Image (cartoon, helix red, strand yellow):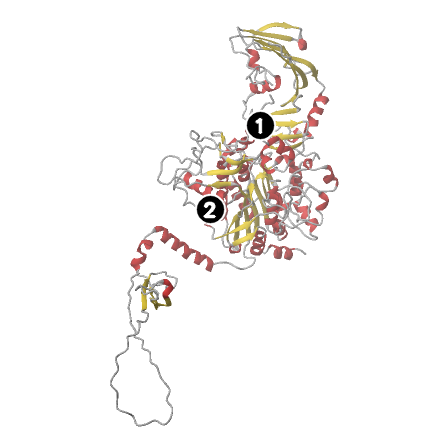
Amino acid sequence: MVKQIYTVVFLATTLGLAACEGDDGLDGSNGVAGVSGADGSNGLSSLVLQSSLGVGDVNCAAGGVQIESGSDDNADGSLDTAEVDQTEYVCNPGATSLAAGQLLSNLNNPWYNAGGAKMRQAQDVLAAVNRQKGAAKNVILFVGDGMGPSTVTTARILEGQFSGLPGEENTLSFGRFPFAGLAKTYNVDAQTPDSAGTMTAMMTGVKTDVGTIGTDEDIVRGDCSTVAGNELVTAMELAELAGMATGVISTARITHATPAATYARSADRNWEDISDMPQAAIDAGCEDIASQLINFEGNLEARFAGADVDGLEVIMGGGRRHFLPNDPAFNSPDAVSSTEGDRSDGRDLTAEWLALYPDGSYVFDDTGFAAIDTATTPHVLALFNESHVQYEADRGNDIAGEPSLSEQTVAAIDILDNNASGFFLMVESGRIDHAHHAGSAYGALTDTIEFARAVEEAYFATDPEETLIIVTADHSHVMTMGGYPKRGNPILGKVVNVGATDVALASDGLPHTTLTYTNGRGFRDLGNETNADISYGLPVVSGRVDLTAVNTETPGYHQESLVPLSAETHAGEDVGVYASGPGAHLVAGTNEQNLIFHVMNYAGDLVGRAESALP
Amino acid sequence: MKMFPNVPFFLVAIVLFSACVNADDAVGNCEHSGDRLGLHYTVVEQPNNDAQPSVRHLQIWRQERQVALVFEERQITQIWDLVVDGRQKLTRYFDAYERAIEYQPEDVSTATGEDAWSARTQIISDSARSAMPLVDRTGSGCDVLETYEHFDEHSRQRLVWIPSIRAVKSFTSSSEAGEISWQLQEQIVDAERVQGFYDSKSAYQSTDYIDIGDNESDPFLMQMMNLGSPDLSPHHAGH
């Protein structure tokens, strides 16, 4: 600040006045002038201090001048802070325009231009939002089980790196959807949720307890007697009542929690067939999940008087053992167990299904799947494995072959869109969750990539103007992406810092990977093993391991974990919700997970259409 | 359970040496083929010192393409299924808890094929037995007993084999470390009794190995998984 000081001096004089008595006489002659009195002392100097203010100053945003004035009390010739009596500001006028040259570096940068283009695109998308209730003829809900934010981010990087790109700039298919939001996943009784309660929330609009299917929070887990009176209606059932075609696909057992929540009610997610149920529950009349799947049509018609529905058109997944009796005579040709079936009631649900749908197709392997005529087949029941379907990375090890999730999705849509009233489809990638539980980022990410492929296939197989597609997760996991790896560093690899070529060493002198788990069974080096579940039989490895000679990018590498636990856990953080089509804009914001039902219901007018269809 | 220190139990590695391969006698029309039976063994391990011998009991139950191995002292039963593609599927039963863990074939990295299966169902694999010289054959028809012996400077093995049911009657292995011997105590050929054994296990509550991560609230699984119980490992043969 340049200071300019001006000094002004004042002279002070003192005058005295005296009082007189009687009449005034004539003025005498002037006397002789007296001697001048002594000069009075000097007064205080007044000082003014002027300082320039830069752009951004709190008093003058565009800069200006600060003027301070006061008396020089200590007569030192400078205006000290304590001597300032008054401060004034003369501010510069604000800038009203920028010269092009001032923004040249921005304007010439591809990041800047890409962002600008994205903004324009976003404006167009907003302008084209379809707010009309019931504008979605079709609704597809994709659920990546356990596909939390870190999984999405790292899967897109891995997908990009598989294509030879650095990876970070890549976008998974649903990342290109115009609208996204966050969902709070907690269950009514759990901060960190499970799949049963979360999927019930998405399918019914009602949050509920951990481990329960299709019932509200008044349920007592494991107590059959508490089901009655607490049953909820699912979006799948509403669609069915509305006359839409309906389908459910999962890479888990089709009786597992997530798919089960689309069609069943159960006091316990583990009651997949009658042999899993306690006798008390059987005696009390509760029906196992597999039976409810087969009896979907009849059960729905029994609940809604006058309803006339045609059942689920598409059912694809694993879990064949829950549909067959525990008798070797019922084994499938590709059975891995001597007695494939688990059912203790002697029922063959696959036969019951065929009796209900004699024109339907029951398939259990790749060959059967390929033979499905999607143009004419009215109903399909596909059970590809005794238990869960293979991990995508491990799919080649199935005896009789299994179609991929994306292949199943395309086939399902081809069947469902034969219905002029539209369709409701739920597709789950159920084993992202399993891979995380086993501590395998490779397994989780490769399943996520295939999941994204299925979403892309669905998008291009449908009309986006009349199809609402929602992609989300039921809950997250505790895999983290950390360190400061340089751009393009292998996402499954060890951290190499920006500008470096050698791996970064932690405080303990050991290398570390970008991906780690907060808890779980910890480090595994299983080489090219593609089945993540091998991990469970090996001892828990807590903490750090010397990874110097370890290839952490192999399918069989399981990341280190901090807290040793029997299995890696779910995480309670919010998950992403991505949407395209009519009503997609409604997922924006941070919402309770059960809002997803309301978005689907609004866009598809499911309740309204169901009511209209009922007599 | 180990035959020798550091030697896997079910692939009894009788020392490789040149010998002619002995073909089984034709057992033809014996009443019991060995596909459906139970075998109870006593296994005595005597070290070459003053230590007390250890005695263990093993049951083998066969049923077509299934074999159960009951480790009585550990209260653990392994039931192996022979899959159509030659792989083996394991279900492990924890008898004290009446609970079971079911593994998929890909969870268990084991040898495949008929020879590997023979080791599982017979204690000794066909190839290992064939590598031992046949030194004696007694009896006739379904009562034939075959004796195989092997000697080298470090050890001696003697196997008495029942070809009609493809089972070990006795097996003794002696070395500088000591002696281990297997003795067949009981042979059960009653098909109903065999079926009853398998039926008793099928009543256990079973959980997929894969689903362990979704069952953290299960006290049994938590107990078994904590710190990597070896019995939970698909690679642990219950030794």
Residue depth check, mark 1 versus mark 2: number of the one nearer the observer: 1
Left or right of residue A116: residue B194: right
What type is the residue that disc 2 sits on? Ser
Please state, as top left, top right, bottom left or bottom right, where the C terminus of chain A lies in the image.
bottom right
User: Badge 2 sits on which subunit?
Assistant: A
Q: Where residue B102 sits: x, y (%)?
A: 61, 30
Visible in this render: residue B30? no
Judging by the rendered image, the residue that carries numbered circle 1 is B233
Which numbered disc covers residue A221? none
Residue A599, image x and y in percent?
A: 56, 54
Question: Where is A254 relative to B5, above or below?
Answer: below
> Looking at the image, is B173 positioned above or below residue A417?
above
Q: Are marks 1 and 2 in contact (CB under 8 Å)?
A: no
x and y, in percent, of residue A281 in the image: 72, 40
Residue A594 in the image: above or below residue B133: below
Q: Nearer the viewer, residue A316 or A86?
A: A86
Q: Residue A438 vs residue B43: left or right?
A: left
Of A370 and A585, nearer the camera is: A585
Disc 1 with disc 2 on a shared chain = no
Q: Name, please, the residue furthest toward the right.
A: A283
Q: Residue at x 67, y 6 (%)?
A: B139
Q: Where does residue A451 sit, x and y in percent of width and height?
A: 50, 42
Q: Which residue is mark 2?
A: A173
Q: Chain of mark 1?
A: B
In the depicted view, which residue is nearer to us: A495 or A231? A495
Residue B173 in sight: yes
Q: Amino acid at mark 1?
A: Ser
Question: In the image as oriented, which residue stretches furthest toward the left?
Answer: A32
Q: State how far apart marks 1 and 2 are (Cα).
A: 38 Å
